[in-house]
Image (spheres, rainbow, N blue to C red):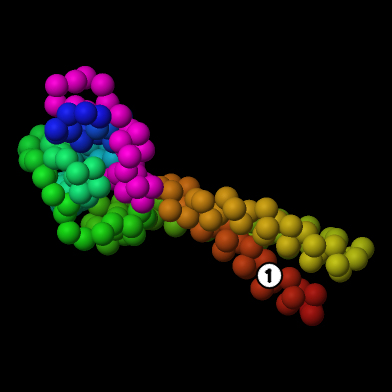
Amino acid sequence: MVGETMELRVVRGRPLFVEADGPLGLKPEHVGLSPTLCAALYEWAEVVERIGRGNPPDERASRAVARRGRLLAGRTAGECGRAVRYHDPLTGEPSTLPAPGGQRLVAGSDPRTEELDRTARPTGVTVSVILAVLVSVVLVVVSLGLAEVNPLLGVVVNLAVAGGFAPSVWLGRAVPTWRWVAFGVVLGVVVSWVILPLSLLG
């Protein structure tokens, strides 16, 4: 992008950067932003989309979204070295951020301290718990069945599952929505490792 100022927009739940005099938008990763900031922008845009569907939108959540949007726009201005025009996606209030906005963001951590995350967290926790139960039950049943043939097989299966899931869990830990799946898988594996020794001793 070659202009002096670009504008941060949310289109269908996705963040886009648009030149002041151009109709085309670029994704955060195409602007040259860091992976951490890209993930934070995507997460913020998804929350904006969810709140925007409310009728009427929740005022407290809207204020939290606006503050986070300005902060992200300031971070973007700092990383790109250029001004970022920010239009509040819910109120339309304009502002221009010429410099970075202070505190450092870590994708996935900031929304948990924001009031707006209270609407997303219960669903995420529910998904994590359901997956944890499924993973632990499957691992325990399969491992106990294999242990009747050879106890070593049960250990090998558990290690293979943990090793197979490890890369996906590591990559998904900071990705919106998918981080809850990752948490559930990890919890399920840990629970199965606790239950299996107790079952074998019993």
Kindly indicate the quadrant of the structure image that contains residue 163: bottom right
Residue drawn at 33 percent across, 39 percent down: 32
Is 76 positioned to the left or the right of 37 in the image? Answer: left
Q: Residue 11: where, in percent of width, then height?
A: 27, 29
The three-letter amino acid code for the residue at tag 1 is Trp
Q: Nearer the viewer, residue 192 or 25?
A: 25
Residue 26, horizontal then vertical, whole percent:
30, 29
Confirm whether residue 13 shows in the render: no
Specify the quadrant that holds the N terminus.
top left
Question: x%, y% of residue 55?
Answer: 20, 36
* Image vertical order of residue 131 relative to residue 98, above or below: below
Within the magenta stretch, is there residue 25?
yes
The residue under the point 55% across, 54% down is 169
Find residue 47 and report its image quarter.
top left
Q: Report helix, strand or loop for mark 1.
A: helix
On screen, residue 195 versus residue 67, left or right, reads right
**Crowding near the residue tagged with mark 1, few <14, some 14–19, many ≥20 C-alpha atoms within 10 Å:** some
Relative placement, left or right, of 149 versus 180 is right
Residue ID at (74%, 57%): 160
Q: Is residue 38 magenta?
A: yes
Q: Is residue 160 left or right of residue 86?
A: right
Is residue 80 at all visible to an observer of this figure?
Answer: yes
**Badge count:** 1
Q: Which residue is mark 1?
A: 193
Q: Which residues are magenta?
A: 18-44
Residue name at image x 17 percent, y 29 percent: 3
Tell me the quarter of the image containing the C terminus.
bottom right
State the image coordinates of residue 200 (x, y, percent, origin top left).
Answer: 80, 75
Residue situated in front as seen by the camera: 80 or 171: 80
**Residue at the outermost bottom position:** 201
